[in-house]
Image (cartoon, rainbow, N blue to C red):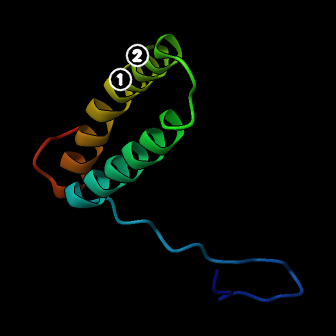
């Protein structure tokens, strides 16, 4: 984090994160790789199916919001 204000006052500027479609796709891919690695450590088929169900449920909640945020930032969709 880069400081642009007076350090005595403790003010710091946080750069705005640019949200892009491909950035969100990369986050999703990284998350899937993480889940896949965690599933590989499970010891039973039931645990594997439960973990996959949880992962799919989480993706179904995250993906629509991520796509909407990216489209809003690109100006394709109005708020």
> Circle 1 is placed at which residue position?
56
In which image quadrant can residue 68 be found? top left
Picture layout, residue 39 above or below residue 10: above
Most foreground residue, 23 or 13: 23
Q: Which residue is drawn at 14% across and 41% down?
A: 77
Helix, strand, or loop for circle 2?
A: helix
Q: How many labels does the image show?
A: 2
Picture layout, residue 60 above or below residue 32: above
| Cα gap from disc 1 to disc 2, whole angstroms | 5 Å
Helix, strand, or loop for circle 1?
A: helix
**Mark linked to residue 53:** 2
Q: Residue at x 31, y 41 (%)?
A: 66
- The picture places residue 26, in percent across and down from the top left corner, at 30, 57
Dot 1 and dot 2 residues touching (CB under 8 Å): yes
- The picture places residue 38, in percent across and down from the top left corner, at 53, 39
**Crowd around label 2: few <14 · some 14–19 · many ≥20 (10 Å):** few
Q: Name the quarter where the C terminus is drawn.
A: top left
């Amino acid at each position: 984090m880069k400081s642009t204000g007076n350090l005595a006052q403790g003010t710091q500027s946080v750069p705005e994160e640019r949200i892009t479609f491909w950035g969100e796709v990369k986050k999703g891919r990284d998350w899937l790789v993480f889940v896949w690695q965690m599933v590989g450590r499970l010891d039973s088929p039931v645990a594997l199916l439960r973990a996959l169900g949880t992962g799919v449920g989480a993706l179904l909640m995250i993906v629509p919001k991520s796509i909407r945020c990216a489209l809003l930032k690109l100006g394709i969709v109005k708020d």
